[in-house]
Image (cartoon, rainbow, N blue to C red):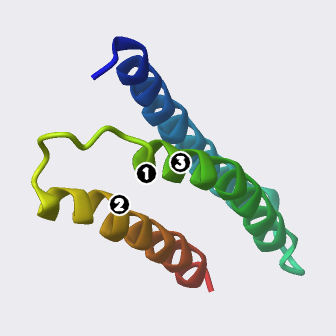
Amino acid sequence: MNPLASLKAKLDAIVTFLNVLFLATVSYVGDFIGDTRGERKIVDIVIGLFIAGIMLPAALVAIASGNYTGVDSSVKTIVTVLLPMLGVIAIAYVFLKKR
């Protein structure tokens, strides 16, 4: 694997982690502000969709354009098909859990 591609993948993982941490912080701080009409939920959803809209395409392109030479076909299927589906399900679960 190209060293630059490996570094980019690690940096992408770090950025994703920081974005998730930011969303958790925004949600946690919002509980203390006081939400009488549901404004915090709307803001959380908008911020979450905005970050997901930025991160998901980049992550899916990075996963799909990886070099799978010598990798078992079952691993390739898990990484290219199952992982994106689980990501979408996880995002939907987070928003539905807040209801």
Q: Please report whichever mark, 3 or 2, sits nearer to the chain's N-terminal start.
A: 3
Q: Is residue 69 left or right of residue 32?
A: left
Q: Find residue 64 and name its label.
A: 1
The reply to whether the C-beta atoms of the residues labelled 1 and 2 are less than 8 Å apart is yes
* Above or below 65: residue 12: above
Q: Please report whichever mark, 1 or 2, sits nearer to the chain's N-terminal start.
A: 1
Q: Give the distance between the C-alpha atoms of the residues marked 1 and 3, in whole angstroms.
A: 5 Å
The reply to whether the C-beta atoms of the residues labelled 1 and 3 are less than 8 Å apart is yes
Q: Is residue 34 left or right of residue 21?
A: right
User: To which residue does mark 3 refer?
Assistant: 61
Q: Give the distance between the C-alpha atoms of the residues marked 3 and 2, in whole angstroms.
A: 10 Å
Residue type pointed to by label 3 = Val
Q: Which residue is painted at 53% across and 70% down in the image?
A: 91
* Above or below 51: residue 5: above
Q: Quadrant of the C terminus?
A: bottom right
Q: Give the distance between the C-alpha atoms of the residues marked 1 and 2, in whole angstroms.
A: 6 Å
User: To which residue does mark 2 refer?
Assistant: 80
Q: Which residue is painted at 48% across and 42% down in the image?
A: 62
Residue type pointed to by label 2 = Thr
Q: Which residue is painted at 59% across and 42% down in the image?
A: 19
Q: Quadrant of the N terminus?
A: top left
